[in-house]
């Protein structure tokens, strides 16, 4: 049982170090996937907007971490 | 026909991820070999490498059976979390917010600990030493396997990515055993930064493709994403460095 828990923790650790970053990225991708096709803008901007959101989340996270540490 | 805008970055990402994780695994293997003997060190390493190779051989082709749009979204999301985690860590290390990993210090600590545990070990089958190397190689190797399988299966570059990762691993083993000490001078944070950028770029590109969002410039957009991510990460490093109140944790941190 301990081995399974350890392996599970290691697997989660591959993707999540800072919970806020992971949650915000998942939420943003979810919102973008649902909302962007419905927003009345040129569809060629959808990918760019999703990308910009991910970058903004990363920058906000590292700046906040820098101030906190 | 190979799409070199994908194959090139995929091979580089797998090579660099493998290089970094092999250096970290080598530190433990050398510590175990030096203190507890080379037999358990090689048994543990060999067993872990076998499991990792099996994972690639089984999961890689199996993922090829999943519809590409499903793969692009699910693997893209996982790659995004993985890549951004590495990029975040690299930025914070470069900015001096978190300390850089010192392989020499890790080696010294591991040898001390293993030497202490050795007292009282009389069995010929040193299970603790085998387990230590197995765990270290598995933990570091899992990251490489994930990058190889994820990038390889979605981008149809499994073989080039596997070769890239294997070459890096062999290279580190040769240099490590020739020098007979941990590779403390490898620019680990620069490697982490580069892999973080490449993996995040693939992730965002594939996520959008899977969601049906088209990229300006089609496949060539991935090169633009890489360039923008580098610029943003370098800018974020400077921003964090200037906003953080403390001085850098260690001289020589790279971006």
Image (spheres, rainbow, N blue to C red):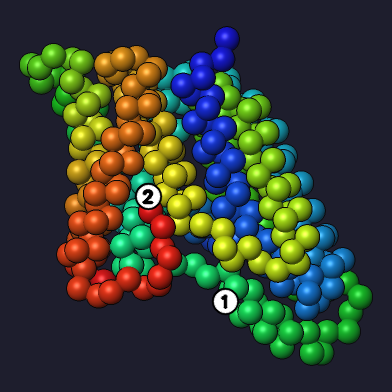
Residue B74: quarter of image = top left
Q: Chain of mark 2?
A: B
Point 72% across, 60% down: residue: B176
In the picture, the disc for residue B87 is 2
Residue B241 position in % (x across, y down): 24, 63
Instruction: Say above or below: B114 vs B137.
Output: below
Q: Earlier in the sequence, mark 2 or mark 1?
A: 2
- The answer to whether B178 appears left or right of B102 in the picture is right
Point 27% across, 16% down: residue: B216
The reply to whether residue B20 is in sight is yes
Q: Residues within 10 Å of mark 1 (few under 14, many from 20)?
A: few
Residue A44: quarter of image = top left
- The answer to whether B57 appears left or right of B40 in the picture is left
Viewer-closest of B142 and A6: B142
Q: Chain of mark 1?
A: B
Viewer-closest of B59 and B2: B2
Residue topped by disc 1: B105
Point 68% across, 33% down: residue: B163
Q: Residues within 10 Å of mark 2 (few under 14, many from 20)?
A: many
Instruction: Say above or below: B234 vs B114.
Output: above
Point 56% across, 21% down: residue: B156
Count of labels in the image: 2
Say which element carries label 1. helix
Residue B41 position in % (x across, y down): 79, 65
Residue B28 position in % (x across, y down): 67, 67
In the picture, the disc for residue B208 is none
Outermost right residue: B124
């Amino acid at each position: 049982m301990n081995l399974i828990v350890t392996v599970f923790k290691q697997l989660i650790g591959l993707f999540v170090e800072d919970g806020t970053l992971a949650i915000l990225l998942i939420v943003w991708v979810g919102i973008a996937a649902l909302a962007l096709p419905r927003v009345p803008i040129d569809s060629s901007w959808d990918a760019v907007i999703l990308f910009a959101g991910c970058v903004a989340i990363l920058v906000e996270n590292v700046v906040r971490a820098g101030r906190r540490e | 026909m190979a799409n070199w805008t994908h194959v090139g970055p995929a091979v580089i990402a797998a090579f660099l991820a493998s290089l970094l994780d092999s250096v970290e695994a080598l530190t433990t293997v050398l510590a175990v070999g030096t203190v507890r003997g080379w037999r358990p060190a090689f048994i543990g390493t060999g067993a872990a490498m076998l499991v990792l190779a099996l994972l690639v051989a089984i999961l890689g082709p199996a993922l090829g059976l999943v519809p590409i749009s499903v793969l692009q979204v699910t693997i893209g999301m996982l790659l995004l979390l993985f890549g951004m985690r590495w990029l975040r860590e690299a930025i914070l290390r470069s900015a001096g917010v978190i300390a850089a990993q010192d392989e020499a210090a890790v080696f010294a600590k591991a040898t001390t600990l293993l030497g202490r545990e050795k007292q009282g070990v009389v069995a010929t089958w040193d299970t603790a030493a085998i387990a230590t190397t197995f765990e270290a190689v598995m933990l570091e190797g899992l990251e490489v396997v994930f990058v190889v399988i994820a990038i390889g299966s979605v981008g149809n570059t499994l073989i080039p990515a596997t070769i890239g990762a294997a070459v890096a691993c062999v290279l580190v083993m040769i240099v490590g055993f020739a020098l007979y000490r941990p590779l403390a001078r490898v620019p680990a944070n620069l490697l982490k930064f580069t892999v973080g950028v490449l993996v995040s770029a693939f992730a965002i590109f594939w996520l959008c493709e899977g969601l049906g969002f088209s990229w300006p410039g089609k496949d060539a957009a991935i090169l633009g994403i890489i360039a923008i991510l580098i610029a943003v990460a370098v800018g974020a490093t400077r921003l964090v460095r200037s906003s953080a109140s403390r001085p850098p944790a260690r001289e020589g941190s790279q971006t």
